[in-house]
Image (cartoon, helix red, strand yellow):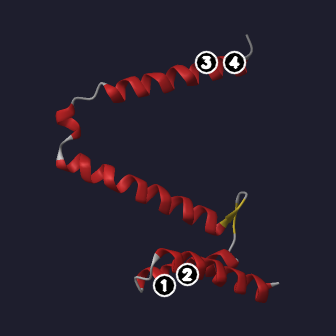
Amino acid sequence: MSAQWIAVIGTSVCAFGLKFLGHSVPESWLSHPRIQRINSLIPIVLLTALVAVNAVTTKSKIVIDHRVAGLAVAVAALIAKLPFPFIVIGAAVGSAVAYHFGH
């Protein structure tokens, strides 16, 4: 058996173990208010990290380009409490305009 298959099988066993442990957590632990607050913030933090990494990196380098302009427009639209479609369209237009004038 090759090292790759050992890694695949080992990873699969670890994933199964984590899922099993997740189902074994007592309901009283999960209903605690602090745990519920933390669980409600995890998707927000992960999405923010994903946007930040994709906005300022290319492969393994940090770059400041047209994507940052789109992100700035999106943040301004969020602060202005615009509806979601306007935020997305504004970010796309802001990024496109910065790309056009940058190249």
**Looking at the image, is mark 3 or mark 2 earlier in the sequence?**
3
Please tell me which residue lies in front, 6 or 61.
Answer: 6
Residue bearing the label numbered 4: 5
| Type of the residue with mark 4 | Trp
Q: Are marks 4 and 1 in contact (CB under 8 Å)?
A: no
Please tell me which residue lies in front, 3 or 47.
Answer: 47
Residue at the (71%, 86%) spot, across then down = 97
Q: Are marks 3 and 4 in contact (CB under 8 Å)?
A: yes
Nearer to us of marks 3 and 1 is 1
Residue at the (65%, 17%) spot, across then down = 6
- The span from disc 2 to disc 1 (Cα, nearest Å) is 6 Å
Residue 33 against residue 88 in the figure, above or below: above
- The span from disc 3 to disc 1 (Cα, nearest Å) is 47 Å
Residue situated furthest top in the rendering = 1
Q: Percent x, y for residue 4?
A: 71, 22
Residue 25 against residue 68 in the figure, above or below: above
Residue bearing the label numbered 2: 72
Residue bearing the label numbered 1: 76
Q: Percent x, y for residue 12?
A: 56, 23
Dot 3 lies on which element? helix
Q: Are marks 2 and 1 in contact (CB under 8 Å)?
A: yes
Residue 75 against residue 49 in the figure, above or below: below
Q: Percent x, y for residue 21?
A: 36, 25
- The span from disc 4 to disc 1 (Cα, nearest Å) is 49 Å
